[in-house]
Amino acid sequence: MIKNISLNKTWFRRLLFSYVTIFLFIVPLLMFILLMAFSELSRKTAVESNEIFTKQVLQSVDNQLKLMDNTITNEIASDDTLLGFLILPCRTIAIIRAICRL
């Protein structure tokens, strides 16, 4: 009976050690693959969020520049002094070109 228990323990130990080595190899491998997958997912998410942020900044800058352009255009159109200042050189250049053609 003691031999039978001894054989059972030996068989159990052999079985245990054969599967423990596989377990110790597979578990870290699976953890490494999972870590790499999370890393790739994190990288893709960061790239996507950076693209969205860049588009929002670009749109904000574009809107501010359009607002400034409209404000300056309206100010020039409504102020006679500025309008005269900007149109006078154009008239002078046109007169000089006309004289040179003669």
Image: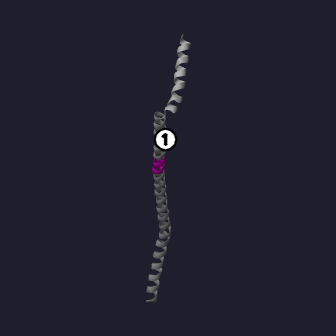
Figure disc tally: 1
The image shows residue 89, relative to residue 102, as above or below, that is below
Verify whether residue 53 appears in magenta.
Answer: yes
Residue 45 location in percent, x, y?
46, 55
Outermost residue to the front: 80
Residue 8 vertical position relative to residue 21 in the rendered view, above or below: below
Looking at numbered disc 1 in the image, what kind of residue is underneath it?
A: Met
Quadrant in which the N terminus appears: bottom left
Position of residue 66 measured from the top left corner of the image (x, y, whole percent): 46, 40
Q: Position of residue 15 (x, y in %)?
A: 45, 75
Closer to the camera in the image, 41 or 97: 97
Q: Residue at x 50, y 31 (%)?
A: 83
Residue 74 in the image: state x and y as whole percent: 45, 37
- Residue at (46% x, 89% y) in the render: 2
In the image, 41 versus 27, the foreground residue is 41
- Residue positioned most to the top: 102
Establish if 69 lies above or below 100: below
Dominant SS of magenta comes to helix
Q: Which residues are magenta?
A: 51-57
Q: Is residue 14 magenta?
A: no
Q: Which residue is mark 1?
A: 68
Q: Is residue 17 above or below residue 80?
A: below
Q: Nearer the viewer, residue 52 or 63?
A: 63
Q: Residues within 10 Å of mark 1 (few under 14, many from 20)?
A: few
Q: Quadrant of the C terminus?
A: top right
Disc 1, SS: helix
Residue at 46% in and 49% down:
56
The colour mode here is: one colour
